[in-house]
Image (cartoon, grey):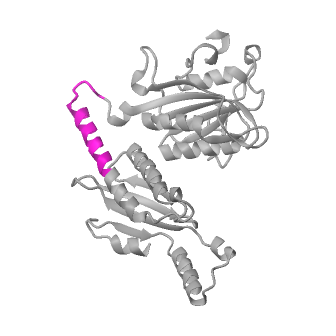
């Protein structure tokens, strides 16, 4: 961190970049431990090392090759095992869209791993190389965004802005979640990292009723996690909130955002550990079905677009398929999926 501070002292025009230690008390604790080690010749106790907090810093750099490309900010957290383990990285950019910042972060995470954890227990220092890679990747993203904006401006027939043009929605059905609390927390983290918005609908085990019982179902009141006074948000929705843990079934996830981000979410759902099996072992999702994935511009004739929604929210479905039908209709996504995998609304619609 001391080297980074000397390399990137910060100028008014940010030509040299600016590195700021975010928890100087953590740096002082490490320095004191090292000084004691050097003075005594005795390695620090494991307890002393475990008590150290991760070192955190923030590096802001100008995006090169342009006067109006703004800055890219890289937030770094060094684990105690660094450089044997890769640093945790977060990226934001003043003049680039959210999807570009996500792309830069993905590139830097993979790059940092090749310089640290991939080299074995001892690893290697990486911060200076990561800083250079951040500028290089940000410059490439800025160039691509400039081309995209130029193409958009030159098209007389295209009325959507670039974010609307790239907006995508997907509906995924997950048969069940054994560790629903951990599963939902993982999905929420993915959405945050990928810049996606989502609505997750879940039921208690055997909570989806038959079409016959649906006819007598009644909608339940809605409650949001932010309603501290416990007042209902709307009487037309189910009970809002994530599952408290344990098994839930017949889960529907509506995801919206940049098309690349949605695709990465769907890929992670298939390839990464997200749940536990009946024995408590980590497992991947093997019983999910993508019922639809389409861009906002692909709305069928006579079909209303998917209404805007933001953030990550969960909602318990009470009332069987009748209630689930109303939820999907609320998002203009009722008729999704094909064949046996398709959600069958009441009356076979």
Q: Look at the picture and state if 203 lies above or below 88.
A: above
The quadrant of the rendering that contains the C terminus is top right
Residue 333 % position (x, y): 54, 22
Look at the image and say whether residue 155 sits in the magenta stretch.
yes
Residue located at (59% from left, 32% from top) = 253
Q: Quadrant of residue 160?
A: top left
Which is more toward the observer, 346 or 231?
Answer: 346
> Which residues lie in the magenta part?
138-159
The quadrant of the rendering that contains the N terminus is bottom left
Look at the image and say whether residue 32 sits in the magenta stretch.
no
The answer to whether one can see residue 137 in this image is yes
The answer to whether one can see residue 242 in this image is no
Residue 201 % position (x, y): 64, 32
Residue located at (55% from left, 17% from top) = 335
Q: Is residue 200 left or right of residue 27?
A: right
Residue 177 % position (x, y): 70, 36
Q: Quadrant of residue 5?
A: bottom left
Residue 322 % position (x, y): 68, 20
Q: Is residue 315 left or right of residue 112?
A: right
């Amino acid at each position: 961190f001391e080297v980074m501070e000397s390399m990137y002292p910060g100028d008014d025009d940010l030509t040299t970049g600016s590195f700021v230690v975010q928890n100087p008390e953590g740096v002082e604790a490490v320095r004191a431990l090292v000084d004691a080690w050097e003075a005594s010749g005795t390695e620090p106790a494991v307890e002393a090392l475990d008590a150290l907090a991760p070192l955190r810093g923030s590096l802001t750099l100008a995006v090169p090759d342009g006067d109006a490309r703004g800055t890219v900010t890289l937030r770094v957290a060094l684990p105690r095992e660094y450089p044997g383990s890769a640093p945790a990285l977060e990226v934001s950019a003043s003049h680039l869209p959210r999807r570009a910042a996500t792309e830069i972060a993905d590139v830097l995470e993979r790059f940092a791993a090749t310089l640290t954890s991939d080299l074995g227990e001892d690893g290697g220092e990486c911060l200076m190389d990561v800083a250079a890679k951040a500028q290089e990747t940000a410059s490439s993203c800025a160039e691509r965004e400039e081309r995209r904006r130029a193409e958009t401006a030159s098209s007389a027939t295209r009325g959507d802005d670039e974010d609307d043009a790239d907006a995508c929605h997907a509906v995924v059905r997950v048969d069940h979640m054994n560790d629903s609390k951990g599963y939902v927390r993982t999905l929420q983290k993915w959405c945050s990292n990928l810049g996606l918005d989502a609505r997750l609908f879940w039921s208690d085990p055997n909570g989806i009723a038959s079409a016959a019982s649906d006819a007598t179902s009644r909608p339940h009141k809605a409650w949001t996690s932010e309603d501290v006074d416990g007042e209902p948000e709307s009487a037309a929705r189910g009970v809002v909130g994530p599952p408290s843990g344990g098994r839930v079934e017949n889960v529907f996830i509506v995801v919206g955002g940049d098309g690349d981000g949605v695709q990465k979410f769907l890929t992670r759902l298939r390839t990464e550990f997200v749940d536990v099996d009946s024995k408590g072992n980590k497992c991947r999702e093997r019983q999910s079905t993508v019922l639809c994935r389409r861009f906002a511009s692909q709305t069928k004739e006579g079909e209303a677009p998917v209404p805007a929604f933001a953030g990550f929210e969960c909602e318990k479905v009470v009332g069987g398929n009748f209630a689930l039908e109303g939820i999907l209709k609320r998002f203009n996504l009722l008729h999704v999926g094909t064949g046996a995998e398709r959600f069958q609304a009441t009356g076979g619609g």
